[in-house]
Image: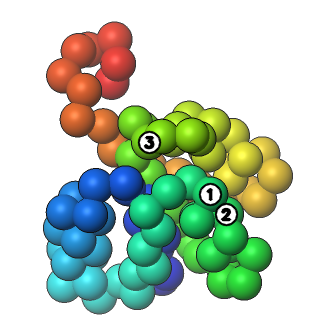
Amino acid sequence: MKILVVDDDRDILRLVSIHLQKEGYRVVQAESAEEALTILEHEAVDLVIADVMMPNMNGFELTEILTNDLDIPVILLTAKGQLADK
């Protein structure tokens, strides 16, 4: 299974990727939603894990494109602590 991890925070990107790779997943990384969409033009992935809070295009906007146009499942990450945000 190949997973695309999208986060503008390089430390979080690295951390999530390391844990996924330890579990045997192949991981592709992107530092923005725009970079993720560019990657997806050339690579197929089974799942996207995306940060909610990213500049330009946030995780919710990216999720709409991925689920509606590309039919790729998405798991959203957030550091927000409010229950309403989660």
Residue 72 screen position, x and y as percent: 65, 60
Name the kind of residue labelled 1 in the image. Glu
SS state under label 1? helix
Q: CA distance from mark 3 to mark 1?
A: 10 Å
Vertical order, 33 against 17 (above or below): above
**Where residue 16 is drawn, which disc sits there?**
none
Q: Which residue is mark 2?
A: 37
Q: Are marks 3 and 1 in contact (CB under 8 Å)?
A: no
The residue at the far front in this view is: 56
Q: CA distance from mark 3 to mark 2?
A: 14 Å
Tell me the crowding category of disc 2: few under 14, some 14 to 19, or many 20 or more residues within 10 angstroms, Cα based. some
- For the point 19% across and 84% down, which residue is it? 22
Name the kind of residue labelled 2 in the image. Leu
Q: Which residue is mark 3?
A: 54
Q: Are marks 1 and 2 in contact (CB under 8 Å)?
A: yes
Tell me the crowding category of disc 1: few under 14, some 14 to 19, or many 20 or more residues within 10 angstroms, Cα based. some
**Where residue 34 is drawn, which disc sits there?**
1
Q: Is residue 36 left or right of residue 29?
A: right
